Image (cartoon, coloured by chain):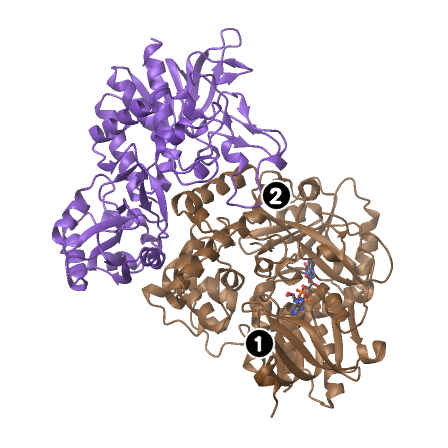
Chain colours: A purple, B brown
Amino acid sequence: MRYDTIITGGGLSGLMAGIALAKQGQQVAILAKGISRLYYNSGSLELMGRDLDGNEVTRPLEAIAALPPSHPYSRVADVAARAAQAREILEEAGVKVRGNLRRNHYRVTPTGLLKPAWLTLDDYLRIDNREQLPWQRATVFNVKGFLDFPDHFVAAGMRRLGVDCDCKDITTPQIERRRATPGEMRSTALARTLESDAALVSLAAKINSHTDDDSQAILFPALLGLDDDKASRRLRRLLDGQLYLVPTLPASVGGTRIHTLLRKHFVSLGGTYMLGSAVTSGSIDPLSCRVLGIKARNLPDQVIRANHYLLASGSFMSGGLIATHDRVVEPIFGLDVDAPRGRDAWTREYLYDRQPYMEFGVATDERLHPLHDGKPVPNLWAAGSILAGNSPIALGNTTGLSMLTALEAAAGITSSQ
Amino acid sequence: MDLRNINGPQSLGEFDVIVIGGGITGAGTARDCATRGLRVLLVERFDFTYGATGRNHGLMHSGARYAVTDRDNAAECMRENLILRRIARHCVEETDGLFLSLPEDDLAYQATFVDACRRAGIRADVIDPEEARRLEPSVNPLITGAVRVPDASIDPFRLTTANVVDARRHGAVIHTFHEVIGFLMSNGRVEGVTLRDNHTGAVKEARAGVTINAAGIWGTLILRKAGITLGMLPAKGALLIFGNRVNNMVINRCRLPANGDILVPDDTICVLGTTSERVPIDTIDDMRVSPAEIDLLLTEGQKLVPRLATARVLRAYAGVRPLVASDDDPTGRSISRGIVLIDHAERDGAEGLITITGGKMMTYRLMGEVATDLACKKLGRTAPCTTATTPLPGSEPEKQRKPKTGYDMGHRAAEGRHGNIFAARRDASPDDNALVCECEQVSVGEIRFAINKLNVNNLLNLRRRTRVGMGACQGKLCACRASTLLCRFKGEADRNLVELAEFMNERWKGMRPVAWGNTLSEAQITASIYADLCGLDTVAQRPDQDNDNSSHDKEEEKEA
Ligand SMILES: Cc1cc2nc3c(=O)[nH]c(=O)nc-3n(C[C@H](O)[C@H](O)[C@H](O)COP(=O)(O)OP(=O)(O)OC[C@H]3O[C@@H](n4cnc5c(N)ncnc54)[C@H](O)[C@@H]3O)c2cc1C
């Protein structure tokens, strides 16, 4: 099988680009290794949360425009148009989100803090105006024995916003059966349990017995809906008060939902999603500087070829970059990496300072072609967290940069045909 | 009426003995004094094991390492080694040790070594290299010689906790976060101490017939407050922790003690060390491991155990050996590891003051014994020492041994950590059985137990008592889980949140010098969870470089 485009990396950027290309009628294969960064997702997607000076961003488009040309966002010609395209794809895939491109809202973190966001899953708690919340009372319900939801931190966060808030543990017979085995009390296992209607009905009865009036907000850990939002819609109908989901520690049920819906959408458009096929190597012709083909772990004897290749293999945590004890390499093609030699300069002493290593990545030209021995590779593009020059955590833009650079690369691939 | 109690510092009371320092020496001395019927106050400026005790190698020497250079000391080690196997069995893993010769080592040294061990009363069996490879498959296959000795692995945190628990059972009053800032003196006689509460800043005082300075390397600074000079030789030692346990026995190099020649297995991990470098006394509160030290340790360690080349380094840490200066050898290695007991009445004319220092962690019991003997003499008391025969809490013989089957992993791990003081709590409900830390098998029940019984106020205390956050994941999820439980059992969510942010910064401190390979990827994941997902970067308070007491409680430590 010959593909038009092969994408290395099955995370948010690989999927976004894959969908955009499949929509153009391309034959696309995504080779995915394992879990992606969406595993750690908050149920929100952000464009830009803080500027380079650390100030909170209200208007993300303006903050992006102010970034220096070395920042990978500057490779995206029309940020607003790409953002609109990303949102359209999310909606087509069935990812229901709310948010406004011109103005950030706040997402509520698992520890009850607020971070700026662009889009938030519509069954999640979202705060538009921190001075004025739509309710004065809330209860944080947690599933008894579920340790990955810092309920008391969430309640404290609500109290800091002036909400009268306390915590309650609840359980159902279905959950109690799980509790016999301690390892089963993890988010994704519980989310499977809470797919059954009996479990939801019993959960709703418990919650309703603790809520005396319907002006009260019901905050519940995001344990609903690995594949879609059916379970949370069902629960919402069964409850007296307003239900809002609050993200948990990983694994992220919301992130899994986003990933599942995008993957299904990609496949329904004719794309091939190969999970468990880690790309092991790729060869670049020294003369033409073009990619000749790649190899994957599960097909060791086969060279897989395509007209175009997209590298969306992520940063260190996803294996897209590897640090040996004195240098940083891109392991598949051996691309040029923007990172100093010698690890003294990679990190800072204080954890929450901007860590230099977070900005390491592959160097690209203006059109997102990575450089190999200083020369751009014309049939290869790079997108997402593998790009050099971004500080995703400090700037609060991990998901936005992934989606937008992926769509920009996809547009480049389409127009190069 | 004593007006000072109204207007001056708050009084903590009158005691027979005040013990300064919550390391293993202070804990062991407090236990000994308390079990001999003395009224004891134990004070520690931060948390137990904050000093060298929390930053050492965890090796229960057979003494073999010192047999050639210091026979008395080696023999002392061997005697205490046998005692600790009985009284502290829940803290000891009986692994035995190997002394290996590599092709570049002089095999003639092996004969000298074995002879010296035997003279010191240390069993030392020369075994065939083939046999050594079978016993310990991780060793370098090229070894030319091997000697088996009764080394073992010992857990400093458990050992200290067990001594503290027993001291308290015998009536000792214990205050952590209380720093000695001066002495109460009259006519040259030490009558007690002035303390600062490091949580509130309040100044307090306590009185006693005898004050025992067991503050390790800091002891020299404390003595200055009584106008006494004691030359101590701070010798820094760096160690590396690997994320999995590659060896089952302690592995030593059979040569004169040098850098990076011991690998000690410890629970689920192993620790490579050490280096030795003399450092200025004013740097002892801020020990960092340099890239050069790491590279040195790795190079030497890989010669003994080649698999270390690919094993993941979890973190690096350093401690300062509390050695008393006896000559000016710059490496600090030829200094005697011997115990130093000073009666300041004799040496300096300061009646009522004793210093106990030097030695090693594993000779702590003997140190406690000699210090208590002297204190008793001064107080005119005659009770005999029983610490060599009475097991520590956790190692007491069980009346009826319940079968080990049928209760869960977390409980078994906790029993390992706390011995049978935890076994009483087998009332485990599903709530208590849930695991907070998978790597270290710490359950909710154990955390509840530690909060209720083991002086736990924050996450750092909890880590030192339970190992939460100390395993391969370095707190990736369990730190947040444990912190939520602290809120649940003790309240104060806002404070706990800031402390969680700081705790993760502490984990980072030890990871940073070894941040490459998987350690760097794991660091990125941890940052994604705590900073990006949870937003703790928005509440973290940047530690102030100078003048911040609380930041002293946040340094990198053993297996942290
Ligand atoms: C790198 C290294 C490796 C080692 N390896 C081993 C080994 O494998 N086996 C072994 O047996 N030994 C080993 N040792 C030696 C061992 O760690 C020490 O001998 C032992 O821990 C000393 O215990 P301590 O209680 O005397 O001192 P510390 O543990 O340093 O305790 C002193 C305490 O006093 C407190 N303090 C200081 N000032 C004040 C004050 N003003 N008021 C109140 N409290 C105060 C400190 O906070 C500290 O907690 C090693 C040492 C180092 C540095």
Residue A14 in the image: state x and y as whole percent.
35, 26
Of the numbered discs 1 and 2, the one sitting upstream in the chain is 1
Instruction: Tell me which amino acid carries mark 2.
Output: Pro
Q: Chain of mark 1?
A: B
Residue ID at (52%, 6%): A287
Q: Is residue B481 left or right of residue B356?
A: left
Residue B424 in the image: state x and y as whole percent.
43, 74
Q: Which mark is residue B174?
A: 1
* Labels 1 & 2 near each other (Cβ < 8 A): no
| B19, above or below B438, in the image | below
Q: Chain of mark 2?
A: B
Q: Which class describes the residues within 10 Å of circle 1: few (<14), some (14-19), or many (20+)? A: many
Q: Which mark is residue B513?
A: 2
Q: Quadrant of residue B293?
A: top right
Residue ID at (62%, 60%): B54
Residue B220 in the image: state x and y as whole percent.
76, 66
- Secondary element under disc 2, as helix, strand or loop, is helix
Ligand 1, by image quadrant, is: bottom right
Q: Is residue B71 left or right of residue A374?
A: right
| B174, above or below A109, in the image | below
The span from disc 1 to disc 2 (Cα, nearest Å) is 35 Å
Are the residues under marks 1 and 2 on the same chain?
yes
- Secondary element under disc 1, as helix, strand or loop, is strand
Q: Is residue B210 left or right of residue A96?
A: right
Residue at the bottom extreme of this rendering: B1
Residue ID at (37%, 19%): A77
| B44, above or below A257, in the image | below
Residue at the top extreme of this rendering: A287
Give the camera-side residue of B192 and B132: B192
Instruction: Tell me which amino acid carries mark 1.
Output: Ile
Q: Is residue A199 left or right of residue B202?
A: left
Q: Quadrant of the N terminus of chain B?
A: bottom right
